[in-house]
Image (cartoon, helix red, strand yellow):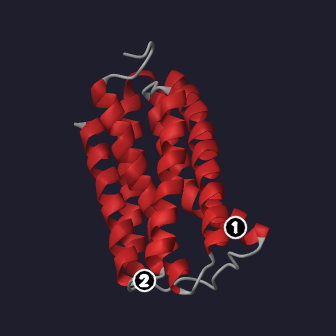
């Protein structure tokens, strides 16, 4: 196997968390895809989301490593609590509805704002993973890959299906993060 690679359990956890975080990009992508989107914009937005899904958890992991040194033994409770809060927030937002004025996803500023908004959750998860000393390169590349992939899937699927699927996708991602938060605490 690869030198310095994460254990199988950690690898599976990282993949599941990356997919759960990608659900946010997926669900919002469905909404944007419903408005009609060109394939070039699908590619641009997805690459931008992938990049932000690398940057945000990277910043979060560095922050988490620092916080982990400060907190010591209570680190797992704090990290689990963060995931529980984030998962609960995603579930509530999925069913709350009533979004603000939509961002113009065709402009560079709109793409950056959209990418940042769907990637901000990755920062919090990165903080939690940083406290556990997760494999840095594996984590950020996996998060970036899944963020980009899930946004492509959401944007393309949004061209074909109803808007309700996106709400359930975000809620599912929230449930997964909530479950991992509980596992870290228990």
Q: Which residue is drawn at 45% across and 38% down?
A: 128
Q: Where is residue 184 in the image (x, y as percent from the top left)?
A: 29, 36
Using the numbered discs, state the Cα–Cα distance from disc 2 to disc 1 in whole angstroms.
22 Å
Pointer 2 local density, CA inside 10 Å: few below 14, some 14–19, many at least 20: few
- Residue 163 image offset from top left, x and y in percent: 41, 84
Could you tell me if residue 23 is visible in this image? yes
Q: Mark 2 points at which residue?
A: 160
Q: Where is residue 68 in the image (x, y as percent from the top left)?
A: 49, 26
Of the 4 image quadrants, the one containing the N terminus is: top left
Between disc 2 and disc 1, whose residue precedes? 1
Q: In which quarter of the image is residue 168?
A: bottom left
> Residue shown at 72%/76% (left/top)?
106
- Compare residues 66 and 169 and report the one nearer the observer: 169
x and y percentages locating residue 72 in the rendered image: 44, 22
Number of the label disc, if any, that sits on residue 123:
none
Q: Which of 49 and 171 is in front in this view?
A: 49
Q: Mark 1 points at which residue?
A: 111
Q: In this view, does 152 lie above or below 81?
A: below
Outermost residue toward the top?
A: 3
Report how many numbered discs are placed on residues in the image.
2
């Amino acid at each position: 196997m690869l030198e310095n690679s994460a254990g199988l359990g950690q690898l599976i956890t990282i993949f599941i968390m990356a997919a759960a975080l990608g659900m946010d990009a997926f669900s919002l992508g469905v909404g944007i895809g419903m408005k009609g989107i060109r394939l070039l914009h699908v590619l641009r937005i997805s690459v931008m989301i992938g990049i932000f899904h690398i940057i945000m958890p990277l910043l979060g992991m560095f922050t988490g490593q620092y916080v982990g040194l400060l907190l010591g033994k209570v680190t797992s409770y704090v990290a689990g609590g963060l995931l529980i809060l984030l998962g609960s927030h995603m579930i509530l937002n999925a069913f709350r509805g009533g979004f603000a004025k939509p961002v113009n996803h065709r402009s560079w500023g709109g793409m950056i704002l959209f990418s940042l908004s769907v990637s901000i959750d990755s920062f919090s998860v990165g903080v939690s993973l940083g406290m556990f000393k997760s494999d840095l390169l594996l984590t950020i590349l996996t998060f970036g890959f899944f963020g980009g992939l899930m946004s492509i899937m959401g944007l393309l699927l949004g061209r074909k299906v109803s808007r309700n699927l996106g709400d359930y996708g975000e809620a599912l991602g929230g449930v997964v993060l909530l479950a991992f938060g509980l596992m870290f605490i228990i």
